[in-house]
Image: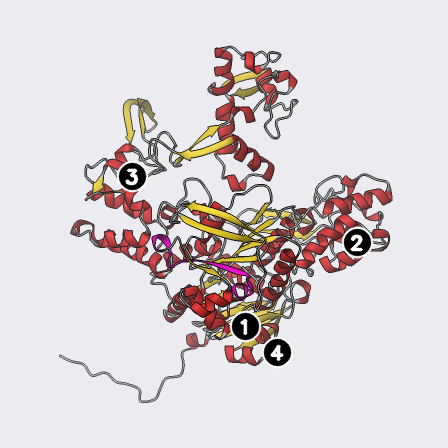
Amino acid sequence: MSTARSTDPQSPAQNIADSHALIRVHGARVNNLKDVSVEIPKRRLTVFTGVSGSGKSSLVFNTIAAESQRLINETYSAFVQGFMPTPSRPEVDVLEGLTTAIIVDQQRMGADPRSTVGTATDANAMLRILFSRLGKPHIGPPSAYSFNTASVRASGAITVERGNKKTVKATFNRTGGMCTRCEGRGTVSDIDLTQLYDDSKSLAEGAFTIPGWKSDSFWTVRVYAESGFLDPDKPIREFSEKEMRDFLHREPTKVKVEGVNLTYEGLIPKIQKSMLSKDKEALQPHIRAFVERAVSFTTCPECDGTRLSEGARSSKIGRISIADACAMEIRDLAAWVRGIEDPSVAPLLTALQQTLDSFVEIGLGYLALDRPSGTLSGGEAQRVKMVRHLGSSLTDTTYVFDEPTTGLHPHDISRMNDLLLRLRDKGNTVLVVEHKPQTIAIADHVVDLGPGAGSAGGTVCFEGTVEGLRAGDTVTGRHFDDRAAVKETVRKPSGALEIRGATSHNLHSVDVDIPLGVLCVVTGVAGSGKSSLVHGSIPSGEGVISVDQGAIKGSRRSNPATYTGLLDPIRKAFAKINGVKPALFSANSEGACPTCNGVGVVYTDLAMMAGVAIPCEECEGKRFQASVLEYHLGGRDISEVLAMSVSQAEEFFGEGEARTPAAHRILQRLADVGLGYLSLGQPLTTLSGGERQRLRLATHMAEKGGVYVLDEPTTGLHLADVEQLLGLLDRLVDSGKSVVVVEHHPAVMAHADWIIDLGPGAGHDGGRIVFEGTPADLVAARSTLTGEHLAAYVGS
């Protein structure tokens, strides 16, 4: 039986739910935003542009994405919220139309020694299950193939407290895949004992040469001298065999020193736990220098760097072990997985195949799953995070990207653009902070912030289409179609830095001469071996200053003045003219306001709810005691000086009563890298990525060296700022320095004196020199991908 359906001949009125097509922001005042109001279309690709420091990240990440995540967190129970971060509501009057935000930023991935590309993306978890089902011989569950899981065996009596207590005998076994020698790290450390102590001295004479180990330190030196195991007055070289064993290798033992219970432990395990178990890059500079001097890391001889036990390496599918699979380039691994046909694991193979194909699609097919995640660049880390979202079935989600083209060759940017458009076409809202014209050009909607940076920015200069931006009179619009011309005349090198037989990572015995006394640009597609050549083959040491993309570490107490060392001469100048101690002029020392401890705000922790930060009533947010603010230099107190911009401070400390040459030199370097607008006391946590990198560059410019090695210095730079950077690089070369730049930006390539191009592809398809010569020769030859894109850029 069929039933007839009646249809209304008139079109029904639009459902009210369909009217929510915009994300509305009104009155945003986060960081430097000045009552910003914008309307962002949903299910469209919106690009946010503007000079570095204009407020893009403040609007996109700290306002829109932060509020979306805060509202989602509030849907969980109070118990769950107690374990989650509790961000406060952004300073904004109205935020409407928000959807679930997924943030894909450039924060480096965890640099734990056991974290790899495979563990960070769950690809390793799927591989472990695959080998536990199909591997021959069968050695155990998935944990038997994990280098983070140690084998455990235990037996004994346990008491079960349930009803009548019962004591039962139990045995416990867990098979893990961790190599016992290196504990899943892949490398073993060999400590140079001569760097730890002077064996001609006794402990009482201060034999230790370890940074921070002072002779009166209760927790380190005195526990050895007064433990009773060693003679503190005997030179270490005269220790008996038993004393030396206790000194270097003794297991943790409780001892009493001056009535206090302490733990005595041999020197080698103590150093391994306190220094070597941490990520080297996270150590303080002087500790890192000590570790590099005292410790040599070599590939574990037992597992050959695979991190896995012999059992895990013996189990194979065909002729491939899990160690072999993780060492393959991901594109090769994807092909191998595609060849496995077993219906019992079909769903697993489909999921694993999809993940591996996403890597290839996103341009990371040259990576291997066993690559330590801490060695990925910012751009690579962001793309690895994208992998888990590419195959997602979620729609009506807001994806937020922070310069997704960072670290990409012009050839790779079109592929990234396709991925962004694909996410949009699935019905998602895509918000992108970006500087590259290639990506701005594909936007459905553009929001341009400015007109300047810092206090000179924070307003919306343009909102509309790409064509409107091009025609508009904003900084971005005026520079959108800028094209640098290839250099007519190039400098002649004064010498050469010879590299012979370089084999680091994917390099194929590369022989190359890097010219000195000129601007040399090393280029090539992502993964072609640029960083391996420059950072792995140029000998670091005397005369070589390397500025990489490592993150600046600092708390909310850190600011440009403390990071660059500028505050030291300023404190001394205040102290000298007022006849008091320099420590008074530090908000982290004697001069700090006692109520807020020099932070400027008083924080109230409200458990699972957002904490409240209220400006300190005692110091009115100035961070210093009232008595300290009575001391003046050039008519300004210390809080007024820290509120100055770099440009204002440069003028202030350059002449008159406040003239301080040491401070003026640092301020000049900050102005040279385009940070003249930054406030001296602005917390480092509020700086953008581009500002942080230029702050690092300004700090390294103070070092004395003849060769500067820069890793993508245009990261985070607006089109208008690139010209200023090129001027800075020219000044460095003209002053007699040699500058080697790893870079993808066509303007920097066109401005080079010499180009070294690696390729032709990525991973094992790269690692070779495909061109050496001037930019003009590269454009004329068009023999490489870089040559083709550079020729198109300069219009040849």
For this rendering, which residue is in front, 120 or 746? 746
Q: Earlier in the sequence, mark 1 or mark 3?
A: 3
Q: Which residues are magenta?
A: 748-765
What's the distance in space between the residues labelled 2 and 4, CA to CA? 36 Å
Check disc 2 and report the residue beneath it.
Answer: 653
Q: Which residue is mark 3?
A: 145
Q: Nearer the viewer, mark 4 or mark 1?
A: 1
Q: Which residue is mark 4?
A: 473
First in sequence: mark 4 or mark 1?
4
SS label for mark 1 = loop
Q: Is residue 456 above or below residue 756?
A: below
Q: Which of marks 4 and 2 precedes in the sequence?
A: 4
Callout 4: helix, strand or loop?
loop
Secondary structure category for the residue under label 2 = loop
Q: Position of residue 598 (x, y in %)?
A: 71, 45
Which mark lies nearer to you, 1 or 3? 1
Nearer to the camera, 148 or 236: 236
Residue at the spot of label 1 = 483
Residue type marked 1: Arg
